[in-house]
Image (spheres, helix red, strand yellow):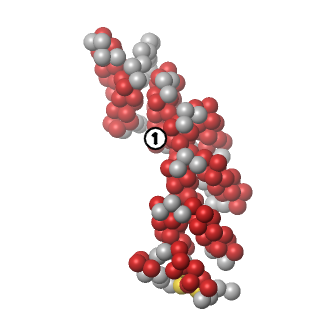
Amino acid sequence: MLVPCVRVERQKLRWPALKNVASAGCIPLLFTFNSLIKRLFQDGHFEDVKSLFEIMQNEGIVPNLETYLIMVNEYCKQEDLASAFGILDQMKEMGPKPNVAIYDCITACLSKQRRISEAETVFHRMHKDGLDHDEVAYMTMINAYTRNGRGDKALNLFEKMIENAIQPSSYSYTALLSGLVKRKMRLKNVGRGFCSKYCTIHFSYQSFSEDGRV
């Protein structure tokens, strides 16, 4: 059985070097694998990522949450949702349990591809899997709605976020208003029951409409 190396120097952290180390009977620790996986993605060596992942599994090195988050994030950057969903399914089967950040990556990527129905499914699946939506999760879905011309759903979800005792940050208010204005969405009967900051958004949006800027 291969024994873990305590350390691999940063300048030697390359795929050919790792294969030489492995052939000598020494496998780097998980931190090194995670760093190399990220670098291989950045350099576009996607097949090497799969080979490296196989080495980890063959040598009994269990990927942690960071490993999977790196992979899902990088696959989503490449808009390779099939691979991202494959990682998500593997986590559900073998562990560790996916966290909110992993779902957020996939939701944002689906939004970018205008696959809103699927983004909604992932958003609701998160809750079914026992995870509570945080502000980032809500805003990821809200941004998906505004990006794709669904201002009504964006505002409804924003209201639900507040009802669930999640206080939006100034960034979230700004992002919502910006998303609505940029896409020139005309909305009626909004702002009911919202806090003062939300009413400010409503009145600001209304003023843009009246001035002809929306």
Counting from the top left corner in percent of width and height, residue 162 is at 46, 31
Q: Number of numbered discs present? A: 1
Judge whether 98 appears above or below 204 on screen. below
Look at the image and tell me whether residue 110 can be seen.
yes
Q: Is residue 173 left or right of residue 139?
A: left
Q: Amino acid at mark 1?
A: Glu
Among all residues in the image, which is located at the extreme right?
93
Q: Residue furthest bottom?
A: 24
- The C terminus: image quadrant: top left
Residue at 56 percent of width and 84 percent of height: 21
Image quadrant assignment for residue 50: bottom right
Q: Is residue 17 above or below residue 175?
A: below
Visible residue check, residue 203:
no
Which residue: 48% across, 39% down?
140
| Residue 47 horizontal/vertical position (percent) | 60, 63
Q: Residue at x 58, y 65 (%)?
A: 49
Q: Is residue 61 above or below residue 108?
A: below
Left or right: residue 32 versus residue 58 is left
Q: Quadrant of residue 124?
A: top right
**Closest to the observer: 62 or 36?**
36
- Give whichever of 161, 82 is nearer the camera: 82
From the viewer's perspective, is residue 172 above or below residue 34? above
As drawn, which residue projects farthest toward the left? 211
Q: Residue at x 37, y 25 (%)?
A: 182
Frontmost residue, 194 versus 39: 39
Residue 209 in the image, given as x and y percentages of width and height: 33, 13
Instruction: Look at the numbered disc 1 and give the secondary structure of its residue.
Output: helix
Q: Residues within 10 Å of mark 1 (few under 14, many from 20)?
A: some
Look at mark 1 in the image and give the residue it sits on: 135
Quadrant of image for the N terminus: bottom right
